[in-house]
C-alpha cells in the first residue's frame, strides 16, 4: 500500500513520514526533495528562477512519475490544490491529512528558507493559506489527524493504527452498528457495509458514502460514484441512506467514520444544526447537498447552484421566472442572480415565494402570475414531474417559442414539462444537465478528483 501524507508546512509530514516508512519497512519519498533532485537546484532557487508556476509544473511532473507499490510519500503543502495531482496521488493509496493549529505551525516553520507565497508576513500568510486550502485538504484526504500535541513518533504510531483498520473506537462502533439498521440502507449494501466494518473479506479502510433522501432509491448518485471509484482506483463504496431523520445519519457517519454523503429532498435545509462548518455558498443559499466528514468534523457544501449556473451561462441579464421556493429553488435563485438575471419567483404558496425573493432581491408572486410575465428563461425547481409523478407545475399554455425552459427534475430524463416545452418550440435544458454538473463538483468534494462531464454521463448509463 502507498501512503500519502498531505497538509500544510509544519504539520510533520516529513519527520512523521520517515518514521512511518521505517515502521512499515517501505521506502520514503519527500516530494519537495524529489523536485529539487530533478531540478538540480533547491526550492528557493526554483521560485526565484521560475516563480510559483514553474515550481507547480515541476511538482505535477514529479507526482505523475511517482512509482507504484509500497511507499510513504510526504507531499508538498500545495500539491492537492490541483485535481490532476490528487488523481495520481490517490490511485492505490491511502491519503492522510496532517493538521495543526496556526500557533503550532508558526512555531514549527520559524526560520524556514521556503519563500512566502503571498508576500505577507508568516503570521498573516499561514491563516490566509490554511483558510484558502481547507476544502482541498479535506477533499483529498481519506483520514485526518491533528498533530498539534503529537510528537513525530506518536503521529507515526497513530497513522499505523489507522492503516491496521483501527479507525473507530470500540464504544463508537457498538453504538454506530446499533443505529445502522435505522438508516434505510438496502439489504445487500447493508450487508457489505457490515463486512467492511468488520474486515470480513472486505477492506476495512474502505470509505463509505452515499446519498441521503426520502425517497432516495431513484437517485443515480451511487451508481455513477461506484463506477468512478473503481475507475480511479479509490477504496470507496457508495450506497443509499433513507433515514427517518438526518440527525441519526450524521451521528452514524461520525461514529463509524463514514466519508460523508450527498443530500437530497427533504434534508437539504435540515442539515445546518448538525454541521460544524458550512461553506459560504451553502450558507447563502440556506441549503446543503454535500457533507464531508473528517476526524469527526462535518462540513457542508452546496453544488446545486453550480449545476444550475453552468447550463445558463450565456444568458446573463435575462428576464427569468423561477418556479418553486424550496432548497433547490434557493440554489437556483443564487445561481441566477450570480448571472445578473432579473428574477421573479413564483410559487403556489405566495408567502414562501416572498420569503425567498426577499433573500435574493427578486420579484415574487403566485404561480398564476406566470402567464402575464412571458420570461426569456423559466427554471422549474419543484419535485412535480419526478418519477413516478406525471404532473406539471407549469401550465403548457404558459410556454412560448424561444423561451429557455430548464427543469431541475432529472428522473425521468424527459419530464412532462420538458416534453411540453419542446413541443411549444422552447429551448429545453433537462435536469440531467444540472445533475451532471453538480455531481461532478460533489465528487470533487468527496475525493479531491474532478472528473470530466463526459465521464459522469458515461458512468450514469445503465
Image: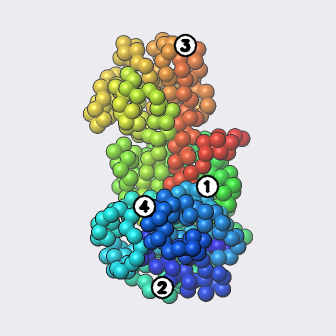
Circle 4 residue: 133
Circle 2 residue: 152
Q: Secondary structure at mark 1?
A: strand
**Closer to the camera: disc 3 or disc 1?**
3
Instruction: Pick whichever of labels 2 and 1 is earlier in the sequence.
Output: 2
Q: CA distance from mark 3 to mark 1?
A: 40 Å
**Closer to the camera: disc 2 or disc 1?**
2
Q: CA distance from mark 2 to mark 4?
A: 23 Å
Q: Which mark is residue 238?
A: 1
- Residue at x 58%, y 35% (from the top left corner): 432
Q: Nearer the viewer, residue 9 or 207?
A: 9
Q: CA distance from mark 3 to mark 2?
A: 67 Å
Q: CA distance from mark 4 to mark 3?
A: 47 Å
**Closer to the camera: disc 3 or disc 2?**
2
- Residue at x 44%, y 58% (from the top left corner): 135
Q: Secondary structure at mark 2?
A: helix
Q: Look at the image and tell me in which quarter the N terminus lies.
A: bottom right
> Badge 1 local density, few (<14 within 10 Å), some, or many (20+)?
many
Q: Which mark is residue 424?
A: 3
Amino acid at each position: 500500500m502507498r501512503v500519502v501524507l498531505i497538509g500544510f508546512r509544519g504539520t510533520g509530514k516529513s519527520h512523521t513520514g520517515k518514521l512511518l516508512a521505517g515502521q512499515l519497512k517501505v521506502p520514503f519519498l519527500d516530494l519537495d526533495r524529489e523536485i529539487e533532485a530533478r531540478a538540480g537546484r533547491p526550492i528557493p532557487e526554483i521560485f526565484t528562477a521560475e516563480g510559483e508556476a514553474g515550481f507547480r509544473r515541476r511538482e505535477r511532473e514529479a507526482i505523475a512519475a511517482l512509482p507504484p507499490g509500497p511507499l510513504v510519500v510526504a507531499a508538498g503543502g500545495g500539491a492537492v490544490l490541483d485535481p490532476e495531482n490528487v488523481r495520481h496521488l490517490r490511485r492505490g493509496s491511502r491519503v492522510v491529512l496532517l493538521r495543526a493549529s496556526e500557533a503550532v505551525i508558526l512555531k514549527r516553520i520559524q526560520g524556514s528558507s521556503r519563500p512566502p507565497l503571498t508576500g505577507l508576513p508568516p503570521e498573516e500568510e499561514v491563516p490566509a493559506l490554511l483558510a484558502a486550502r481547507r476544502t482541498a485538504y479535506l477533499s483529498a484526504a481519506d483520514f485526518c489527524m491533528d498533530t498539534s500535541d503529537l510528537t513525530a513518533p506518536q503521529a507515526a504510531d497513530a497513522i499505523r493504527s489507522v492503516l491496521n483498520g483501527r479507525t473507530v473506537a470500540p464504544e463508537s462502533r457498538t453504538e454506530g452498528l446499533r443505529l445502522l439498521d435505522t438508516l434505510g440502507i438496502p439489504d445487500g449494501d447493508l450487508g457489505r457495509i457490515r463486512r467492511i466494518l468488520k474486515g470480513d473479506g472486505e477492506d476495512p479502510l474502505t470509505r463509505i458514502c452515499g446519498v441521503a433522501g426520502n425517497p432516495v432509491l431513484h437517485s443515480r448518485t451511487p451508481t455513477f460514484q461506484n463506477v468512478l471509484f473503481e475507475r480511479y482506483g479509490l477504496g470507496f463504496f457508495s450506497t443509499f441512506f433513507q433515514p427517518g431523520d438526518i440527525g441519526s445519519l450524521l451521528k452514524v457517519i461520525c461514529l463509524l467514520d463514514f466519508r460523508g454523503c450527498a443530500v437530497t429532498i427533504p434534508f437539504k435545509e435540515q442539515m445546518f444544526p448538525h454541521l460544524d462548518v458550512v461553506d459560504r455558498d451553502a450558507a447563502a443559499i440556506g441549503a446543503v447537498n454535500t457533507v464531508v466528514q473528517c476526524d469527526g468534523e462535518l462540513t457542508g457544501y452546496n453544488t446545486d447552484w453550480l449545476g444550475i449556473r453552468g447550463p445558463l451561462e450565456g444568458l446573463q441579464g435575462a428576464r427569468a421566472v423561477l418556479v418553486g421556493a424550496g432548497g433547490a429553488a434557493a440554489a437556483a435563485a443564487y445561481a441566477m442572480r450570480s448571472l445578473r438575471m432579473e428574477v421573479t419567483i413564483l410559487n403556489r404558496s405566495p408567502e414562501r415565494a416572498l420569503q425567498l425573493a426577499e433573500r435574493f432581491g427578486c420579484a415574487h408572486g403566485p404561480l398564476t402570475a406566470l402567464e402575464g410575465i412571458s420570461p426569456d428563461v423559466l427554471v422549474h425547481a419543484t419535485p412535480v414531474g419526478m418519477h413516478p409523478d406525471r404532473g406539471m407545475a407549469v401550465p403548457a399554455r404558459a410556454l412560448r417559442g424561444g423561451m429557455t425552459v430548464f427543469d431541475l427534475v432529472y428522473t425521468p430524463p424527459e419530464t412532462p414539462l420538458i416534453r411540453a416545452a419542446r413541443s411549444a418550440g422552447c429551448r429545453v435544458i433537462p435536469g440531467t444537465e444540472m445533475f451532471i454538473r453538480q455531481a461532478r463538483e460533489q465528487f470533487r468534494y468527496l475525493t479531491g478528483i474532478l472528473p470530466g462531464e463526459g465521464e459522469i454521463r458515461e458512468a450514469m448509463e445503465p
